[in-house]
Amino acid sequence: MGICAINRFSRWVGALTLSASIPFAAANAQTQQQQDRIDRVSRLVVTAPLCGRLGMTIDRDLPAKVAEAFKAETTGWGIDPQKIEQLAAESSDRQTKLFLQDLGAEADNAKSEKQLRNLGTVLLGYARTCVEATEDLIFSKVIVKPLGFTPEGAATKSADSMLEDGGLASWQTPAIQARGSMMMIAGTCRSVIGKARSDALVSEFGKSQDARARGYYLKSFDIGLDDAEMKLDLAQCNRAIRGFRADILKEDRG
């Protein structure tokens, strides 16, 4: 479920509210409380797919079920159904833009430890929104959090999955990062330093009892192996290997 589902939600709100049989005062404007509720529902609909990625169970029919429940909630507001449809569409569009800008910008810019923390903070905010959804009268029926779910744990896990290829995941210590760099240079320089030396580097620095670290090392080697743009000569490869070996030794010594 993504942006298309959000758009369907807006249309369903309109279709369902138009079928209401009670009279509405078309001239009545929504109150601030009603506008806040519309924005809250839109925000939770927009966030729902991410809640699924964070480990929650999302009802496949969430847009339709939310629209039907929201229709029942708004029938007593005394507002023209077409006005509610318009407000819901505007709110959904606004919340979608905010979501894409906030999360997308942080993910694209996460290239340093500080930026990594910023991404984690944004994801933590959305994880808390997901918890909020599970406590909402409407959304508690279509979004369910697993036992033991914590916003902090879910946000960290999600951020790690987005950043581990670049060595910026929370579990990737400087020692792990240094070994990843060595594995990458072992792949990049394989055609220069030869199979035997490259294999020796992989054997020395590419092993770990931690499956995550082991996967990161192997992926780093593959990235280096596939890099057709970086052309290093023997002197450059030797210098890089010496540098990374020194970094690893430094980290191992603490």
Image (cartoon, grey):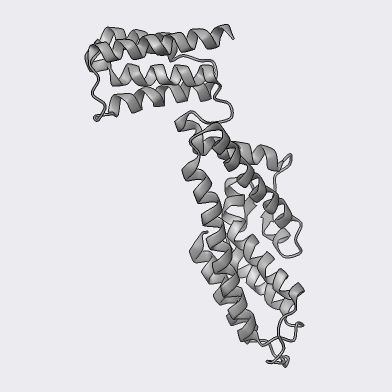
Residue at 28% x, 15% y is: 236
Identity of the residue drawn at 57% across and 42% down: 119
Which quadrant of the structure image shows residue 137?
A: bottom right
Where is residue 216 drawn, in percent x and y?
46, 25
Lateral position of residue 134 relative to residue 189, left or right: right
Query: Residue 140 at what x, y percent from top left?
Result: 73, 59
Residue visible at 45% across and 31% down in the picture: 166
In the image, residue 168 sits, relative to residue 213, either above or below, namely: below
Q: Quadrant of the C terminus?
A: top right
Foreground pick, 136 / 110: 110
Q: Pick whichever, 155 or 143, lies toward us.
A: 155
x then y, percent, for residue 51? 62, 51
Query: Which residue is at 62% across, 77% downward?
Result: 87
Give percent across and percent down for residue 224: 32, 24
Q: Is residue 2 left or right of residue 227?
A: right
In the picture shown, does residue 130 fall above or below 236? below
Residue 242's image quarter?
top left
Residue nearest the viewer, comparing 101 with 132? 101
Locate residue 241: give its quadrant: top left
Q: Is residue 74 above or below residue 197?
A: below
Side of 181 where 159 appears, left or right: right
